[in-house]
Amino acid sequence: MQRRSSSFVRSLLATGLTWLTLAATPGAQAALLPVNTSVALPTGTTSAAEPQLAGTIIDTLINNFSFAASSGTVSGTIESRVIRAVDGTLDFYWQVSSSANSSDDLGSLRLGNLVTSQYLVDWRSDSTGDVAPVSARRFGGVQSSYFNFNFATRNDAGDLVGLAAGQTSYFMFLDTDATSYDLSGIMDVADIPQQHISGIFSTFAPTAETVTVPEPGSLALAGLALGLLAVRRRQA
């Protein structure tokens, strides 16, 4: 796992680097992804269509993957980003790149342990990239925090194709209401039949805010201190 240096991240913050709209054509709204459901992602979206997606990159990391597939080796990178949106919440982004010498097409980016109040997913048509995910699928039960972005589709000849050698996906995202994050998420990439899969990598994930509640003993001591202060004031 290759994480950008803290100086790199600080330079982004210092320059106020924002997620800029590269195309003015509005797309569709981010898709709600219920449990045990697949949704099509035909057009992607933009910050022009969804202004709340605009924001600042606050963290980024790059994972290098390589695994044996049916015709040889598939390799490339997955870039993960955390965006602090203009409304103060966090959005999580991923972009997959396949190396020029990869032997087989990639079929999906698979993500897990990303817990949020509702799953709003899509891809940014105003980002750089060659290939868009055609759909997203969320699982159910104990895997309800797991979902895939799928690239596999049929070409004009009827053959299944995905993210091919030398291609890069558009940025795919999960729009959340979280305000904090950590590296508790997991991810991998798989070929089209999902018979050959990369290793598992850590990725950014939303976390719940924690509120520290004083223990009963601490509360009692605080109350005693206030009571003594009041007595001293009366004596004065």
Image (cartoon, rainbow, N blue to C red):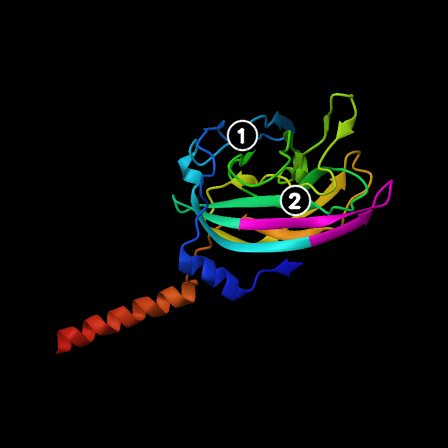
User: Which quarter of the figure is the C terminus placed in?
Assistant: bottom left
x 66%, y 37%: residue: 148
Q: Give the amino acid type for the residue marked by disc 2 in the picture.
A: Val
The quarter of the rendered structure image containing the N terminus is bottom right
Q: Please determine whether, in this image, residue 42 is positioned above or below residue 233.
A: above
Which residue is at 76% across, 37% downward?
A: 105
Q: Earlier in the sequence, mark 1 or mark 2?
A: 1
Residue 48 image point, x, y percent: 42, 33
Query: Residue 84 lies in magenta, yes or no?
Result: no
Residue at (52, 35) in percent of width and height = 118
Name the residue beneath numbered marker 2: 96
The percent position of residue 120, horizontal first and vertical second, equals: 53, 34
In the image, residue 78 lies in the stretch drawn in magenta: yes
Q: Which residues are magenta?
A: 64-81
Q: Specify the amino acid type for callout 1.
A: Leu
Left-right relation of 116 to 108: left
What is the quadrant of residue 43 in the picture?
Answer: top right
Instruction: Tell me the element at label 1.
Output: strand
Residue 39, position in %: x, y? 61, 26
Which mark is drawn over residue 32? 1
